[in-house]
Amino acid sequence: MLAVLTAPAIGRRADSTSLSPLTSLTELMDPSLRLPVEQSLAARYSEWVAEALDEIQGCFLITDPDIAGHPIVFASRGFLAMSGYSLEEVLGRNGRIFQGAATDRQSVMEIREAIREERTLQISLLNYRKDGTPHWILFHLFPVFGVEDGRVAHFVAVQVPIPRRSRCLRSLAENRHEGGTGRFLVACRNEFRSDYKLGCNPVVELFVDVDNRGLEAEESRHATEQEKEKACDAANSILSTLAHYSKLTGRVISDKRRSEAGISAINSSLVISLGRIKQSFVLTDIQLPQMPIVYASDEFLNLTGYSRHEVLGRECWFLNGPDTDADVLHQIRQSIQAEHSCTVRLLNYRKDRSSFWNLFHISPVRNASGKIAFYVSVQMDENAKSNEHGLSPHMRQLGVVGAVKVAVRSLSMCAGPSRR
Amino acid sequence: MLTIKRVPTVLSNYQDDSSEPRGCGRNCLGECCLPVSKLPLYAFKNDASPKVSSGADELPSDFFLNTLLLGQWEDRMSRGLFRYDVTACETKVIPGKYGFVAQLNEGRHLKKRPTEFRVDRVLQPFDPAKFNFTKVGQEEVLFRFEAGEDRKSLFLEHAVADEAKSPSVVAINVSPIEYGHVLLIPRVLDCLPQRIDPDNLLLALHMAAEAGSAYFRLGYNSLGAFATINHLHFQAYVLSTPFPVEKAPTQKIPIGNGLSQSRVKFSKLIDYPVRGLVYEGGSTLKELSDIVARSCIWLQENNIPFNVLISDSGRRIFLFPQCYAEKQALGEVSQELLDTQVNPAVWEISGHMVLKRKKDYEEASEDYAWRLLSEVSLSEERFEEVEAYIFEAIGLVESKETAAVEKNEGTPYQSSTTVSAAPHFTEGCLVLH
């Protein structure tokens, strides 16, 4: 069962007094996510991929880091059977829902970091089914990259159950183990041979439904070579299926990021972080003269009526129109030149040419080098509900700026695959 | 008497002022002004409460951290309340096994008239003549943070202070180590000295839980472990990368009798320059908090300085007993390390180093961090003694059976011989702060 697929987690914490994860399931998928979640696979791999994926044996999930909350967009039948959930209960949710009280926190962190750094990870993990019972799985995560833009298109998480074994099998599994306590980074591309013979039959599933406390008290459980191989095989099948179907739409994917990617100013982990900020804002890249938009939140798209691909790469002044006050625009430009933030009210236009008064705030954002890398601009429709939860609109805009500043600074300081 | 001159960090704009309290009208956090103030209040949810307030929508999940804390912080930035723009300070992850984080920050350690501050005593009474947080101006406060009575967290933009309770506040740190660096000051009017007790540690855990982000940590420095002000406070900020200490391997400490009903898991750090204990789990936040608090109380009462890191939204707590100040006073730290002027408090121990000189920043290496932090750690022998006392203090017996799974490092547990818990410092050790 999938544990956590979050990068920086700014989400609601499960009730601290409960032991089972069930209480967090009372929330349904956010309705605004329904369409993106349903379209996520089809948009890249065509309508036929779901059927092809259904034919692959095994338990696995596919998630989309470009959608706010990094939700699950596909769950295999094997996964649903193993976990006890129905598809509706899982789609659109974040993988952390399968995590519970005894899930090792450091393992959760390793998964989070693997997502952030866009790399493969294989780790054993304690997860929880719908009925609250815990079980151990070998969790194998890998990213799938768009060849053209070099960005992560999806993450795939394969799970192989690790049953409780008799002592002889356990010690054999442990002896094969390289060291550490159940954590290993495996590059699983190569042929994988199970090259040992056992006296006893490793295939016998000695899975006993022991009491939860016993299971939870185990610090870790090691996977056998065979289980690791099973995970790699499933991963390869899924990857080749996705690669094949991605050719139908032209948005081809690969398991490797192409080193010379196109213009892709921000990496997947920054996208995931920004996706958690539920307000209208855009990020513009000031290192290019026309200051193109490199990120736009869903709320911006809803407010203005544009779709994401109509906005990305465009210069940031396109919301202005015939009746937009030129003096106010000048004020904004001056602030940008002076590297200051600025709050103004100006008339803007949606895609359908209807206008609205935009409470607009723009601020420079520095990255880890200490230099300005982006500008963040936050839009608010004056007529929209204001004074939510006791904070003025301006204060809410500042919240966006703060969250963006933290994300950009932190995520650019790491040595790693990030581009800035 | 041994003395060392050290340059402190200023946490409040009012810290430079003379220590005479000003009259009111300054809108401070003292008895004069705070009770009639109308600071915003964030009342975090009380799981045990039967009451559910109708009408008010539940706050969005990122409200506390993004909208309230970071948003208010950004507001104070635009009002020029910070000594410098920390986002203009270059920062990087040092290549290496653990990824220590280094920052070049020349503005943080400002020179000021040094004040005497004994660091040979972990517990010292509150001294109203010295700088404390009641003297801070209310503009440095972002909001009050207290337990609510509802099953939902609530936010009130202007809340009248409760006369019966001393308010707890979140204030900015004017010399921030990172964007969003704040101070949590429990029960500010009660003028508590810097010491851990169960209630206040629980408040800190609740703050970690409300933020709901594994990258928002809280930290605590005892006196003698580089706390700069003897008025109870925790620090907190967001850094969206794991701290080196969070990545370090741990070895579970098997527990025999005693608190076997407890779901708290105990481990110790292995292969990390500072020895420390890791507490995880527990059925409730309070259960975890109480156990950590009892451990800290033992250390306090036995005059061992320590630091606490609250990470993973309050689910994982690190406890580091340390001895750097004593070594410094005794002249046992190399001049080369002293020249970098890094005081190893909780953030440094966790792996986030602020360097004052460009040369140090450019040459910063994992090796340097390791060498510095090794000086902070208790020796293996001393740590095991302290560990044994701590377990005794919290009513646990370590299991005599060898751990089933761990096969590599890790010393098997030795039963402690009775050794008196000698005070950690030689008497008369004074550091000019």
Image: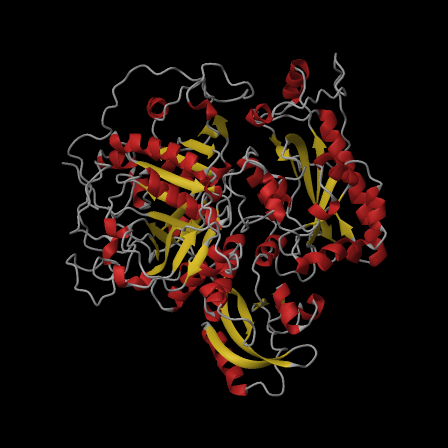
| Residue drawn at the location 66% of the way across and 39% of the way down | A2
| Residue drawn at the location 15% of the way across and 52% of the way down | B129
Up-down relation of residue B358 to residue A221 (above or below): below
Image position, residue B81 (x, y; %): 33, 64
The answer to whether residue B162 of the structure is visible from this angle is yes
Q: In which quarter of the image is the N terminus of chain A?
A: top right
Image position, residue A380 (x, y; %): 55, 72
Front residue of A163/B102: it is: A163
Q: In which quarter of the image is the C terminus of chain A?
A: bottom right
Residue B268 quadrant: top left
Front residue of B50/A175: it is: B50
The answer to whether residue B363 of the structure is visible from this angle is no
State left or right for residue B302 relative to residue B308: left
| Residue drawn at the location 51% of the way across and 52% of the way down | A413
State left or right for residue A326 relative to residue B429: right
Image position, residue A9 (x, y; %): 55, 49
Front residue of A223/A70: it is: A70
